[in-house]
Amino acid sequence: MIKRILAAVVGLVVVGGLGFLWYAWYPALPKVALPKSGQFSAAQIERGRIVAAQGYCAECHTRQDLGGGPTLAGDYAMQSPFGTIYSPNITPDPETGIGGWSEEALARAMKLGVSRSGAHLLPAFVYDHFTKMTDSDISDLYAWLMTQPAVHMTHRENTFPLSITPRIVLAGWKMLFFRPGDFKPDPNHDAQWNRGAYLAEGASHCGSCHTPRNLLGAEKTGSRYDGAVVDGWIAPPLNEHNPTPVVWTEDELFAYLRYGVAPLHGPAGGPMSPVPHQFLSKIPESDVRAIAHYFADIDHAAQRVSGDRAALELAMQQSKRDLLGPTTDADATLYQGACAACHYNAAPSPVLGRPELALNSALWLDEPNDLFMVMLRGLTAPEGQSGVAMPSFYNALSDHDMARIAAYLRRTRTTRPPWTDLEKKAAEARKLVEIPPVNSSH
């Protein structure tokens, strides 16, 4: 009996192992010659440009540190709990890029997460979203990529332990978390909603930043769009858990996604800033409206109310009182000196150009990350609201100063509980901002 049990266990292990190898193995696809000039029509290349902008390809495949790098040549550093991942070169260079890739190879990478060589790709390449894209969109994207300038450049090696992780291990990750398949329109919604869902869930991969991840780096399916931390910034919830006092309407979402600023919520900063300014501003307006329509419905579907309007009005009144002269509140005095000259609102309602902090999303989040990051980095003219810049206070404010201002704004502009450990969190944010200090006190 014992021998039979052992034999059965061994048999199951062997069969299971063979089954896993069958699941995990993909053949290498042959290299192809670089497509000839004129092989693709101008209309197809233009459609591919739009798909690339919808997916922000240049953002993650262009080096940002070390003085930057050529567009699409890769070497963009992505921090993860498992090490630093450097994106590959996706220009049509035949040696260091994807010049030898066929359209079939690109489609397999995007829809199944498998490279031309047959190796499984790291899920930092969000094929769990790209798998929902149509074959025609991927075909157009291929045409655009193959007509871009070829750049001969390799990327840095992923850091330990990613640098030595066998790619077959990723097949196990896929078995647990990856479900390939095209986007399926929802018959209960109209064409605009489905177009927005297709873009948000597919090429634009919104959940990759706005959905928290589990210990193995997969999106938590039960917490879709609940918000997450990206490069020290908080990508806020896009659903009913968004804490701002005014609901994100479809018009506000459209303004934010198209122009980078929403009057009742504030500007796009940090990793979100390129999305409207460099990409969504360059695709058809109807697509941006479709994404806004989709997310407005996700929020409203839970019957979230507009928030505490009375408390909001009191906070806006406090904004006006900050300009009226001396105060016995030392934190208010510090805020008046550092911030109030720009962040005041003397009108009966919020006005564009003088950001009303009582409405700004950064003050209403569970943690002060976004507020500290903006204070430390500032906002350049191309970011946030077009043509309006905010200076960096990296060298002008200490961690203690920033903590005092954050505490003051939280208690006078919102109805949310006080933040804790503010000075420690300010110091942590400072470490993430690459601005050289003027002196050692900072």
Image: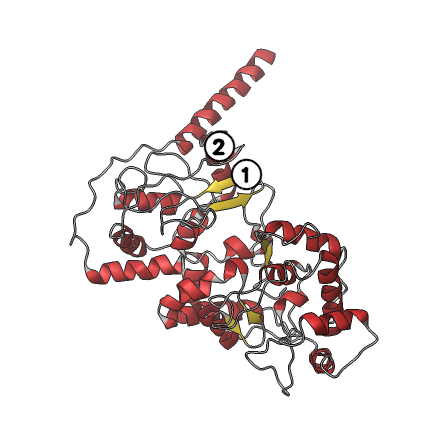
**Up/down of 9 relative to 284, above or below:** above
Question: For residue 434, which numbered disc appears in the image?
Answer: none
Give the structural element (helix, strand or loop) at label 1: strand
Measuring from the top left, give residue 225's x and y in whole percent. 56, 59
Do the residues under discs 1 and 2 have CB atoms within 8 angstroms? yes
Q: Looking at the image, which residue is at 63% across and 54% down?
A: 438
Circle 2: element type: helix
**Nearest the eye: 254 or 226:** 254
Q: Nearer the viewer, residue 250 or 399?
A: 399
Name the image quarter holding residue 186: bottom left
Vertical placement of 230 versus 239: above or below? Answer: above
Which residue is painted at 19% across and 59% down in the image? 41
Q: Residues within 10 Å of mark 2 (few under 14, many from 20)?
A: few
Percent across and percent down for residue 146 are 25, 50
Q: Which residue is mark 2?
A: 163
Task: Please indicate, yes or no, whether residue 276 appears anywhere in the rendered image.
Answer: yes
- Nearer to the camera, 371 or 399: 399
Residue topped by disc 1: 83
Q: Nearer the viewer, residue 426 or 23?
A: 426
In terms of sequence position, does the residue under pointer 1 or pointer 2 come before the other? 1
